[in-house]
Amino acid sequence: MWLYIFRRTLLLIPIFFVITVVVFSLIHLVPGDPISSLLGPGSTLDDRDALLIAYGLDQPLWIQYLRWIKDFVMGDMGQSIIEKQPVADMIFYNMPFTLRLGLLSLAISFFVGITLGIISAVKKNTIIDYISMIIALLGVTVPAFWLGLILILIFAVELSWLPVSGSGGIEYLILPAISVGLGGAGLVARITRVSMLEIYNQDFVLLLHAKGISQNAIVIKHILRNAIMPVITILGLRLGFILGGAVSIEIVFGRPGIGSMLLTALFRRDYPVVQASLIFLTMAVIIGAFITDIIYSYADPRVRDLYK
Amino acid sequence: MSIDYQKTKKHKSPLKVLLKRLAQNKMGLAGVVVILILIFVAAFAHILEPYSYKLQDISNMSQPPSLTHLLGTDEFGRDLLSRIIRGARISFTVGVVSVAMSVLIGLVVGGLAGYFGGKVDLILTSFADLTWSMPSILIALLLVAIIGPGLESVVLAIGLSYWAQYARLIRGQILSLKTSVYIEATRSLGASDFVILVKHLIPNSISPVIVAATIGVGNAIVLEATLGFLGMGAQPPTPSWGAMMSSGTAYLFISPWVIVFPGIAMMITVLGFNLFGDALVDIMDVKNRESNL
Amino acid sequence: MLKVSDLAVEFTVDKKTIRPISGISFEMQKGEVLGVVGETGSGKSLTAHAIMGLTSLVGGKISGQIVFEGKDLLSKSHKDMQSIRGAEISFIPQNPMTSLDPVYRVGDQIVEGLLKHLKITKWAAKKRAIELMEQLRIPNAERVFEQYPHQLSGGLKQRIVIAIGIGTEPKLIIADEPTTALDVTVQAQIIRLFKELTVANNVGLLLITHDLGVIAQICDKIAVMYAGNVVEHGDIKTVFSDPKHPYTRALLDCIPYIGMKKGSLKAIEGNVPTPSNFPKGCRYSSRCPYVIPQCKTEFPETIELACGTKVTCNKFDLNLPRH
Ligand SMILES: Nc1ncnc2c1ncn2[C@@H]1O[C@H](COP(=O)(O)OP(=O)(O)O)[C@@H](O)[C@H]1O
Ligand code: SF4
Ligand SMILES: [Mg+2]
């Protein structure tokens, strides 16, 4: 098991490099180079060349990449062209906000989704099942930013229970996390239901009934325990989808975070920042998926044996 | 008696059987109705809109819903209903075109990976998995940043960020079909790789793709709206639902209906595609669980 | 001890109602072994599930009467049935390969039932589980206790499932083809163990099998099922020496015996009708060599003969001695 975890962790390294190569080369496809925006009016071609050399932009792309990645790995992610401060500082300031939002959203997705899924599966083909599934489907279909705006209208403006925007204590986190998490909750609920119904028809459930085990114990201890594994797998696979809403939600709620930092930088063509935030966001999702995968292989004895 | 019954059953075309099963699926039928209405509205938007979607009326700014403006007006006094109707055309087009693009890329990548296996498969699949695990919104944002904002770039961006799902599906299907007796027989008759792939394998693995694509149109519409909301999509005055909500955000407290109604329109639309897709899963008896998620 | 009368189960599939079993009647006494035989699809498992009260879980509507130790089981509430199932009546299911929960250790799955029905501690339950496993000739029982189902062979899984069935010392054991996954020697051991259990503890055993050899070894009574009906039910010796139903006769002809001519082993021609197209008259009429016109239109009555055998056939007075 530990060997498996170790091998999987090593695998993250090439993934990291592939992502950096992709992001780096894509950013260099962007029309208009960053130098132009640095040059003041009335500057000469010589000024331009000087800057190109200063930033190493006269070198071939792969040398630029090697230089950049060497610095990147050492923690030097360059200067923000607009903010005039180290990108690393900006990332480390913003990262915790995004992580907190992401984790709480994920928790909401998981627990709300599982609960809805169980209710639906147990009350299969009743009105309760239909209502929960419509709610789940709405969760999947409604974009996070819209849900965020509607929640602001209801809970911040009409009811004044929670702050409209900003960041601070948990009260600032609730509405954003619900907006992001409900989409995932819908997804989780749908998988939980399907997977529980599938498990319900398996032979071992019949034997449990024959053993005289109570319905509740069968549902929770056995059916849910088995059904949760596909849920974990798909949660890991669709982590990007579930957390993708966080980018727009940071904008809606005016929260600091990597998402809003990325968008601001995109609009201002502040490419060192764009580069770093894309890499961090993607890596966060991939590491998240990696952790889910480990949990999955631990939770299922059959998979556990596969990686012994 | 029983023989007659079987005869009539044999004469039914598969399409008729599908339609009959659909007619029995209430949720799926609701989805179909929503989609048909959307197509109708999108096709005849220029006739259906009560006002011109561009018509500004400064004296009627940010009016709540009323008899003259059923869904109210926006910050330029434009009729919201007319703009939503126009937006339907854009959402529908973006959704269908971008999904068609994803499916096409997915067919090529997944088809090659599944058919050739080995190293080709390993490289293509790792790449697909990597794209699949990245949030599509990030891929789309990056692409829009490169090509510049606008509807065409949004279509391209969505198309390029969702293909991995179809590639995975097609690959899985082909892997299981490849070794079937039927394909072996075709090969022994001397059919070329290309002929087998295009004429036999892909058509036979298409039904989970159709299901996924149906739901995919809904997802694409949501992604378009999100990009539009972030200011990356259709540029004013083009009334994409996302863009409408984007400019409405500044007036959220003054005219919330500018946010609420386009959102509801989108919700119903996406719900329609999902219900139809879910019904297809049952009707076509698609076994792959991933295709309906 | 167990008396089943006119038992039927009804399902609604695609708005059509089917009755895969109906008119099932038989009885058995304490310490007796009743063998139920019949081809696949004849409704043996469904009958077992019905007695356990498990058919309602899959949407089956049950009718008739099941009396166990003077208790009318069909009138019991869900809760009451829960404390009877696994305690007084236990069940050994047909598919040992898939009947264990894949995510729990097999030992814990034996313990789960013991804890539920016997007033013992966890530690005592574990000890008892290991004893049971040893009794069932499971090598390294303590180690197997810690293993997960996927780590065990089919034969071991089958024995775990049997351990679950016999562990709570029930008064009636219903075993649905319990030895199919075992090799012949183990099979014989297990069958002997079943016999010991029934004799020593005065337990009733309802043994479903399509192995007539097994039936001949340990059963006291037999019920022959065909297409959802019991067609012949009686004392094992009487039925084997003097089968009254043409189907029983055909089944017996399928058994190889010492000294038989090569190639003379017969198989019954044709197929068992499925519940959606049971014929109106006798369900065996499409394959029966003794069929008369009346069989096609009238459902035969069940007659109790002087020898004690109950038979459901229009030509119950046929003389069909074996060989
Ligand atoms: N849940 C169910 N729904 C519908 N039909 C069923 C169900 N369970 C069993 N049956 C029907 O009952 C018949 C008998 O099955 P079974 O009891 O498993 O036979 P056996 O154990 O003798 O092989 C089958 O033909 C099957 O169609
Ligand atoms: S009732 Fe008729 S068809 Fe049925 S078993 Fe008896 S003789 Fe044969
Ligand atoms: Mg059976």
Image (cartoon, rainbow, N blue to C red):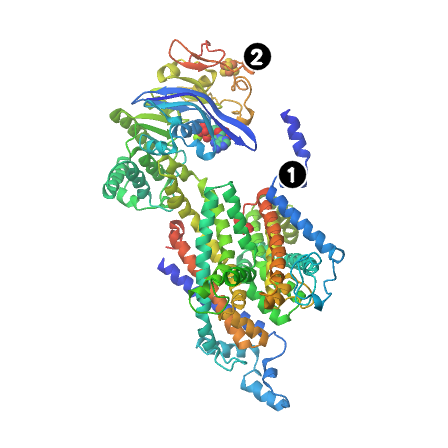
Residue B116 at x, y = what percent?
A: 57, 55
In this rendering, the answer to whether A121 lies above or below A246 is above
Amino acid marked by disc 2: Pro
Classify the position of the N terminus of chain C by image quarter: top left
- Are circles 2 and 1 on residues that touch, CB within 8 Å? no
B1 or B184: which is nearer to us? B1
Please state which amino acid type lies under the numbered disc 1.
Lys
Q: Which residue is mark 2?
A: C293
Asked which quadrant contains residue B230, the reply is bottom right
Front residue of this view, candidates A148 and C240: A148
Kindly identify which chain the residue marked by label 2 belongs to: C
The quarter of the picture where residue A29 lies is bottom right
Secondary structure at badge 1 equals: helix
Distance from the alpha carbon under mark 2 to that under mark 1: 41 Å
What's the mark number on residue A130?
A: none
Residue at mark 1: B20
For label 1, the crowd category at 10 Å Cα-Cα, with few meaning under 14, some 14 to 19 and many 20 or more, is few
Q: Position of residue A153 (x, y in %)?
A: 54, 61
